[in-house]
Image: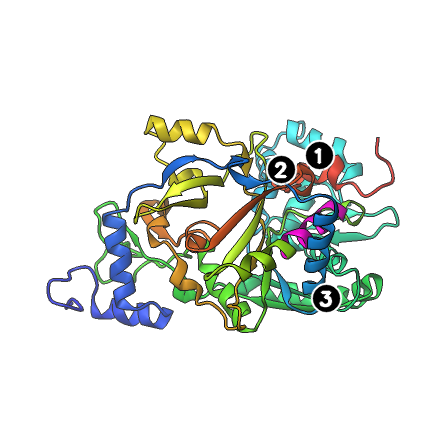
Amino acid sequence: MNPVTAGEEDLYAADREQLEAHGIGVEEARRQLAVLRDPPPKAELIRPAVPGDGIDPRPAGPEADRLAEEGRSAARSGCMIRFVPASGAASRLFAELKTAGASGDMDHPALRRFERARRHLPFDSAAEDVVEQYGDTPKALIPFHRYPDGEVRTALEEHLVEAAAVLEGCGSAALHFSVASRHRPAFEALLEERLPALERRCGCRFEVTLSHQSPATDSIALDERDRPFRLMDDPSAPLLVRPGGHGALLRNLQRLADRGFELIAVKNIDNVQPEPFQGPAVRALRVLAGMARELARSSDRPSRVCGVVPTLGTAGGGPFWVRDESGDVGLQIVETSQIDLADGKQAAILGRSTHFNPVFMVCAVLKPGGEPYRLENYVDQAASFFVHKSHGGRPLFSLERPGLWNGSMAGWTTRFVDLSAEVYTPVKSVFDLAGAEHRCGGDEG
């Protein structure tokens, strides 16, 4: 076997063919290996963004009305699209039930809890049947809410209903879901079955498009001996290529910008309320869209307005003032994994944070003349994620692209806005669907 380049003992001609067939250039692969072997420093937190210092108050009164009308106008004119990452399976949703079933203990606490919650859940089956039916289903296609008339809606359908409400059922609501290619037929089948009835109910047309994460954004990894990880412990074996994390979806956003959408509203698939409770989120999205439009007029780069909510003990990314490599200090969303927790000062700054990023933002991606920004020009590659995983029982060290709302948007103009916690009702466990915020009426006892 001959290396691709003399002195480059990591990658061989067969590797080059494999990578190029995957859409990954050899230079990109070498860059990934170099970064894995010499990771950049962690983020340098200066202080948390807090109300009055980096987090703006919620607009109120006539100002909020004006911004909401601006946002609604953008939606009605077809300038705004909702982007929902929806490739994740619901396996974590049912993890407790799966563990309970595997135990063989029919009196397992999780099974008892499920039975007590049954009347508030959108499932008709027993716990073991629910796990069997939905354990590998995308979270977007899981039943989320049962209405008093018996209608059951998935998370995807509730996003459609909420998008229609943003424009008050007049016009066409554009939505885009990124999905795993193997699940695309199931998405298409649900849309074909449910769209006509939802359009009649909501009084609008839905323009729904789907995309996949590009294989060209995947990453290679290192093994325990600091060599490119291969599918077998053999230098002639193919390289292991792994998905590059949600930062890879920046390409999907770029395609939406290239289609001429001025505003892209980004929300997670599991953060959606039943229709009777969607009012606060609808209002907030309109206001953020209006603010994003105004922010874009004074910015020479892509911009975003991010709603943040009180932490309430929630783990995950939050808003901070951060110093970049050039020494400039600006606002960023930072994940805990990006912080050097062994540094007492950095850990103390993290401990003073008051707000959490629920992924509730509106992005402005066009220049004033209507030309799309090239979003890859504003990525902080030093904000890549490094993960320790295993494959076939062998440990590996892998690189993930800078997170979509972290390093991938690091060069954007950012504004944080305090939102009410009622707009954030995530579903991380099946039992969350039995909570009061996900009940649609009927028996509330």
Residue type at tag 2:
Leu
Please state if 379 lies on the left or on the right of 90 as rendered.
left
Cα distance between the residues tagged 1 and 2: 8 Å
Residue type at tag 1:
Phe
**Dot 3 corresponds to which residue?**
76
Please state if 297 lies on the left or on the right of 334 as rendered.
right
Quick one: which residue is furthest to the left in this view?
7
Q: Residue at x 54, y 42 (%)?
A: 357
Cα distance between the residues tagged 1 and 3: 42 Å
Q: Residue at x 32, y 57 (%)?
A: 220
Label 3: state its secondary structure: helix
Label 2: state its secondary structure: helix
Q: In the image, is residue 24 part of the stretch drawn in magenta?
A: no
Disc number for residue 114: 1
**Dot 2 corresponds to which residue?**
97
Q: Residue at x 26, y 67 (%)?
A: 26
Up the image or down, 96 lies above or below 77; here it is: above
Q: Residue at x 49, y 59 (%)?
A: 299
Percent from the top left, x then y, of residue 250?
A: 47, 61
Q: Which of 111/216 is in front?
A: 216
Percent from the top left, x then y, of residue 97?
A: 62, 37
Circle 1 packing at 10 Å, graded few (<14), some (14-19), many (20+), is some
Please state if 437 lies on the left or on the right of 30 as rendered.
right
Start-end of magenta stretch? 279-289
Secondary structure, magenta segment, majority class: helix
Up the image or down, 431 lies above or below 159; here it is: above
Percent from the top left, x then y, of residue 421?
A: 66, 37
Q: Is residue 85 visible?
A: no
Q: Earlier in the sequence, mark 2 or mark 3?
A: 3
